[in-house]
Image: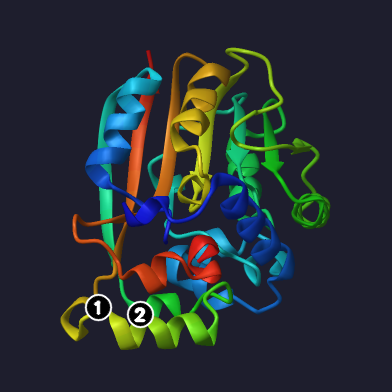
């Protein structure tokens, strides 16, 4: 029951504030997750603000021409890598709930010379896209931030075309609960 | 991390959302040293984790799972 210690609105506010306030260099995160060849494709501004938890792109079956949704794009590292793979005939829709993150992603795409990236402001529990409109949904360290995960995953299913794929990297825990002091710490909901 | 599901719960929610062919393709342990790389983990939170989480578990506080699933 410790996971019910905070209300949904409290969680949402904590996550939003933590990501808005994040002000640290995290290039070491990117170097832990991505190959030098991958990082060479991404502007330093995005590499230095990586906050993902895995490299799901190794397993994402993105084809040239695909429409890809990057759910919770952050500073844009996965968006940029996906946009290289869709090529100019495809596009990547970069969704985030913070305008600051969308500005970073748009700037990184421009710096990378990519014109197949579009930014979208919105919540993962109410994705502002039509039904069956994307081929692939990517998400990296984002689903765990949602206080309504079933709803967020249902939204992913809704916007995917039948046969489309979700490829997600996310934090999971084993059956043993973390201490309540950690579970209720504001930073633990964003970190 | 406080909102993380177990892998079993994550897969169950994917199934209920209408996904199939759900594959867990990677599992990478995340320890306290990995958490220290992220500016989202404050010094206060890291200190709390070091104090309250059993030493043998600090190397594996969570697991990063890479999961791929197909929309039915």
Q: Residues within 10 Å of mark 2 (few under 14, many from 20)?
A: some
Colour treatment of the image: rainbow
Label 1: which residue? Answer: B59
- State the image coordinates of residue A151 (x, y, percent, origin top left): 50, 29
Label 2: which residue? Answer: B32
Residue A41 in view = no
Asked if marks 1 and 2 touch (Cβ < 8 Å), the reply is yes
Label 2 resides on the chain identified as B
Q: Residues within 10 Å of mark 1 (few under 14, many from 20)?
A: some
Vertically, is B57 above or below A47? below
Vertically, is B65 above or below A121? below
Position of A119 with respect to A141 (left or right) is: right
Q: Secondary structure at mark 2?
A: helix
The structure residue drawn at horizontal position 77% and vertical position 44%, both measured from the top left corner, is A114
Q: Which mark is residue A12?
A: none
Position of A76 with respect to A82 (left or right) is: right
Say which of A86 and A49 sits in front: A49
Name which of mark 1 and mark 2 comes first in the sequence.
2
Label 1 resides on the chain identified as B
């Amino acid at each position: 029951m410790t996971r019910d210690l905070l209300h949904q609105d409290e969680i949402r506010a904590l996550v939003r504030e933590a990501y808005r306030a994040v002000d640290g260099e995290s290039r070491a995160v990117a170097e832990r997750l991505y190959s030098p060849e991958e990082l060479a494709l991404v502007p330093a501004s995005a590499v230095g603000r990586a906050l993902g938890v895995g490299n799901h792109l190794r397993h994402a079956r993105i084809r040239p021409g695909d429409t890809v949704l990057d759910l919770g794009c952050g500073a844009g590292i996965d968006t940029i890598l996906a946009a290289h793979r869709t090529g100019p005939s495809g596009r990547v829709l970069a969704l985030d709930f913070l305008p600051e993150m969308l500005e970073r992603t748009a700037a990184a795409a421009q710096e990378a010379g990519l014109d197949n990236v579009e930014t979208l402001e919105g919540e993962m529990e109410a994705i502002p896209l039509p039904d069956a409109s994307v081929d692939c949904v990517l998400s990296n360290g984002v689903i765990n931030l949602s206080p309504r995960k079933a709803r967020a995953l249902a939204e992913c299913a809704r916007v995917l075309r039948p046969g489309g794929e979700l490829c997600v990297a996310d934090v999971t825990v084993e059956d043993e609960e973390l201490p309540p002091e950690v579970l209720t710490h504001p930073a633990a909901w964003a970190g | 991390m406080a909102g993380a599901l177990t892998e079993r719960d994550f897969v169950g929610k994917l199934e209920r959302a209408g996904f199939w062919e759900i594959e867990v393709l990677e599992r990478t342990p995340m320890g306290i040293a990995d958490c220290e790389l992220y500016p989202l983990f404050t010094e206060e939170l890291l200190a709390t984790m070091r104090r309250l989480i059993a030493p043998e578990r600090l190397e594996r506080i969570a697991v990063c799972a890479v999961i791929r699933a197909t929309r039915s």
